[in-house]
Amino acid sequence: MRIENPKIVAALPVLDVELRPRTSLAELTSLGIGGTTDLLRIKKHEAIPDLLTLLDANGVPHKFLGGGSNLLVEDGELLWVALQLARREPDVVLEGNFAQVDAAADLGRTVTYCAKHDLGGMEGLIGVPGTVGGALRMNAGAYGMQIGSYVREVKLHRASNRKIEILRGDQISFEYRHTSFAPDDMMLAVKLELPSKSYREILQGIRICNEKRRSSQPLGQKSAGCIFKNPPGVSAGRMIDELGLKGHSVGDARVSDRHANFFVNAGHATAKDMLGLIVDVRERVHSAFGVDLENEVVVWNA
Ligand code: EPU
């Protein structure tokens, strides 16, 4: 969608919002798939309520983009604009065992920065692409840990009242790949409380997780991580593998040879290919195991 309304165009610099016209979301998502729209880069959190009021008043639909690593965006000209927080410096500020982290901060760099200052706990998240805000929204986790366990405060823009608020950790529920945030709430910053550990010890944990991930996941390929959530007590990847579907493809969308719950873009996959593969694999798992797999990947329609 193009922002052409002169009222909006004139207001954006005042709000410190940068307009990047005709941005290809394929370039902003780890799957390398997605259509084109105008991107608005937000430099000041305080501008968000006014920006959303302006977009709403002028009938411009929008979606919040994080690091784009768990996202499948449809092809073609998109009928909404994308909003994204610009990275701020510094994006991590430490005080004792607390880390105040901007939502736009890169997750992996944040884990490493905290490690260098003897703050651990998040070793399992090393290698998970995306931003801290994205990890927070979906309660990212791996190797027995989840980010929600360390959250003490979250600064967010609340969709329901259009206000920037600070929630305490105990006011938020963090479940397996799910949180109590509303879909349109925008994560702005988080305060984590991390256990003290020596850098050496954390580094050892990081190495172990890195090794496990390298040996079981297709890290060098374009993917959105696991496509489906694991149903209670079972691994979606193992079920898909047992059906012999590794390498199975629709167009250039392919079930990874390394981990069957990772679907990779093996060339020029379209959203249509990827969605086709998701439906096909879900149906096969349903008929073989009677299990309905739920998407972990977030799908944005055009
Ligand atoms: N397995 C297979 N074939 C496969 C994949 C897995 O047989 O193609 C077997 C493995 O051998 C193992 C079991 O299934 O015995 C579980 O596999 P794995 O340890 O890889 O864990 P997972 O359940 O497939 C989950 C998370 C991953 C996370 C890993 C490690 C979900 C949907 N997946 O995968 O998270 O990295 O554990 O903690 O919760 C993600 O969320 O995007 C993600 C990749």
Image (cartoon, rainbow, N blue to C red):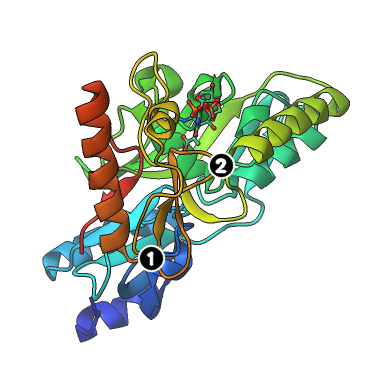
Residue hosting label 1: 269
**Spatial distance from mark 2 to mark 1, Cα to Cα?**
18 Å
Instruction: Residue 258: give its label.
Output: 2
What's the residue type where badge 2 is placed? Answer: Arg
- Mark 2 surroundings: few (<14), some (14-19) or many (≥20) residues within 10 A: some
The quarter of the picture where residue 48 lies is bottom left
Q: Residue at x 30, y 42 (%)?
A: 185
**Residue 191 versus residue 280 in the image, above or below:** above
What's the residue type where badge 1 is placed? Answer: Ala
As drawn, is 22 to the left or to the right of 155? left
- Mark 1 surroundings: few (<14), some (14-19) or many (≥20) residues within 10 A: some
Q: Residue at x 48, y 52 (%)?
A: 223
- Which is nearer the eye, 225 or 4? 225
Image quadrant holding the N terminus, namely: bottom left
- Which is nearer the eye, 194 or 168? 194
Q: Position of residue 20 (x, y in %)?
A: 41, 78
| Mark 2 residue's CB less than 8 Å from ligand 1 | yes
- Which is nearer the eye, 172 or 63? 63
Q: Are marks 2 and 1 in contact (CB under 8 Å)?
A: no
Image quadrant holding the C terminus, namely: bottom left
Secondary structure state at the residue bearing disc 2 = loop
Between discs 2 and 1, the one toward the N terminus: 2
Q: Position of residue 51 (x, y in %)?
A: 29, 63
